[in-house]
Image (cartoon, rainbow, N blue to C red):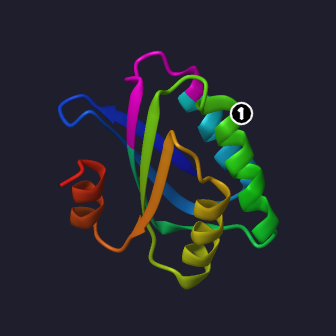
Amino acid sequence: MINYKFNKNKKIVETTITGKTTINDFIRYIIALNNDKNLPETLKIITDATDGRFSEDVTPDDMFKIAEARKRFLSKKYDMMRDAFLLSSSFETALGQLYKEYSKADDFSFNIFATKKAALKWLNNE
């Protein structure tokens, strides 16, 4: 399951991923961000996926599908996006690295972190 809320004080989207997630869960999340009229044009996201896992049918090729969905739905809406992902498993981290490679773009930065403190520092360019 993927849930998010916008923290107005920090101006950061706080996303949590729990349980097993599918590619369709990620695409629905991307579409929800696209449809959300309350988010700023420069989007900072911190995603805590430490309690989440990909479902067994997720493949490395699916990271390309998620990257393409992000480009299709979000690149036109947001001037700049930074997404800091907290991961705790080696499998998800490996898939995250693939996603990072597939997602390279001038208007999008993605990075993987082990701690929230490091992720927030990166998001805020500190």
Kindly tell me whether residue 58 is visible in this rendering. Answer: no
Of all residues shown, which one is farthest toward the bottom?
Answer: 90
Residue 9 x/y as whole percent: 17, 31
Q: Is residue 35 magenta?
A: yes
Residue 30 x/y as whole percent: 61, 38
Q: Name which quarter of the figure residue 99 lies in.
A: bottom right
Q: Residues within 10 Å of mark 1 (few under 14, many from 20)?
A: some
Residue 13 x/y as whole percent: 37, 39
**109 up-or-down from 101: above or below:** above
Kindly tell me whether residue 35 is visible in this rendering. Answer: yes
Q: Is residue 108 left or right of residue 99?
A: left
In the image shown, does 13 or 21 lie closer to the viewer?
A: 13
- Taking the spot 44% from the left edge, 34% from the top edge, the residue there is 80
* Amino acid type indicated by mark 1: Arg
The residue range painted magenta reads 34-44
- Secondary structure beneath dot 1 equals helix
In the image shown, does 26 or 109 lie closer to the viewer?
A: 109
Which quadrant, please, contains the C terminus?
bottom left
- Taking the spot 51% from the left edge, 80% from the top edge, the residue there is 89
Q: Is residue 118 magenta?
A: no
In the image shown, does 20 or 113 lie closer to the viewer?
A: 113
Instruction: Please count the marks in the image.
Output: 1
Of all residues shown, which one is farthest toward the front?
Answer: 106
- Say which residue label 1 marks: 72
**117 up-or-down from 67: above or below:** below
- Taking the spot 25% from the left edge, 66% from the top edge, the residue there is 118
